[in-house]
Amino acid sequence: MDGPAQPAPEPRTPNPEPAVNPQPGRSLTGFYVAIGVIIALGLFGAWFWRTWYVWWFDAGEAKHQQVKAATRLGVPVEKAVDLGGGVALELVLVPAGRFRMGSPAKEKDRSEDEAQHWVVITRPFYMGKHEVTQEVWEQVMGTNPSNFKGAKNPVESVTWDDSQEFLKKLNGLGKEQGQFRLPTEAEWEWACRAGTRTRYCSGDADEALADYAWFDANSGNTVHPVGTRKPNAWGLHDLYGNVWEWCGDWYGEDYYANGPRYDPTGPATGSVRVVRGGAWYFGPYLCRSAHRLRLGPAGGAVTGGFRVVVPAGP
């Protein structure tokens, strides 16, 4: 028997799923920031290393610095001072700069007094393109003390005291606004290196030195006319070999450790003066850019010569 109609069951509402917060996509912003920081730090480190540690440069950069200094000062890279009688003193501009003076601990044939240290040359200067020649000396002094006579040969047998007499007379001619003088030891090495950090401006090998210097292996036991070997990157000849070159400084064995960084001029007093560059009958190791020799101001024998410097601007 049919009973009363049953009401239709109400439709079941499904239980709502719990709300789930959607996971945001993983952002790459932090990754890119981290990469950017790493790159920036790397670039800064490279700049810092290049700016504060790397001081050496190639021949092209040496010439660029030289021309830049000449342009800034409004002076020529090279000039000649007319001394009369067809004789001229040739000069080359050396820019200011900083370098590691001395030699690294592992350099072949180094001496203990060559400890590397920072030096800053703050002012450009002109330096003799060659060692002072016999014709220049004769034109200024009226005499010639040299044993190996030749107008274009470097003057030799010159003591430090003799060089001071020459400079006094040369300055008395009034040819330059500044005063001619001997280079400081730091100026000499800066000019000699011309951006190099090797034993010689030509590299570390003794064999290559023969293109730049007259020394015992190729001189034939005599001096040679100046300018007959290759110049360094700044156009300076005969900084290695031919004759030893007097510097203005007193010699100090520990001066490198105690001297100033900026424009050092050597100890205030002493008993021997610095000579640099080697000579025609000495071996190549004495020609090294960093080698230091000392002689009494009245010494020099037949190997003593010199070149001059003069300020390049006010």
Image (spheres, rainbow, N blue to C red):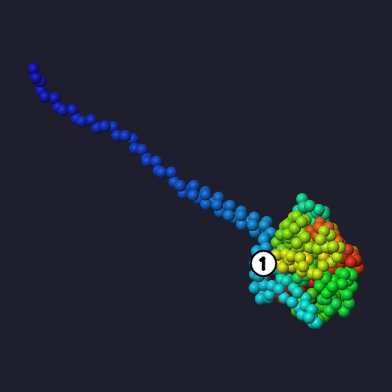
- Whether residue 292 is situated above or below residue 70 in the rendered picture: above
Question: Residue 285 lies in what quarter of the image?
Answer: bottom right
Question: Could you tell me residue 96's position as x and y percent?
Answer: 70, 67
Question: Residue 152 lies in what quarter of the image?
Answer: bottom right
Identify the residue at image location x=84%, y=60%: 216
**What is the residue that sits farthest to the front in this orientation?**
220
**Label 1: element kind:** helix
The residue lying toward the viewer, choosing from 280 and 62, is 280
Q: How crowded is mark 1: few (under 14 residues within 10 Å), some or many (20 or more)?
A: some
Quarter containing the C terminus: bottom right
Residue 276 shows in the view? no
**What is the residue that sits farthest to the left in this orientation?**
1
Tag count:
1
Quarter containing the N terminus: top left
Question: Could you tell me residue 158's position as x and y percent?
Answer: 88, 70
**What is the residue that sits farthest to the top in this orientation?**
1
Question: Could you tell me residue 240's position as x and y percent?
Answer: 79, 63
The residue lying toward the viewer, choosing from 26 and 184, is 184
Query: In this rendering, would 146 be left or right of 197?
Result: right
Residue identifier under label 1: 63
Query: In this rendering, would 247 be left or right of 1?
Result: right
The residue lying toward the viewer, choosing from 69 and 304, is 304
Question: Could you tell me residue 17's position as x and y percent?
Answer: 31, 34
Identify the residue at image location x=49%, y=49%: 32
Identify the residue at image location x=78%, y=66%: 238
Residue 154 shows in the view? yes
Question: Residue 68 lies in what quarter of the image?
Answer: bottom right
Identify the residue at image location x=76%, y=65%: 229
Amino acid marked by disc 1: Lys
- Whether residue 94 is situated above or below residue 17 in the rendered picture: below
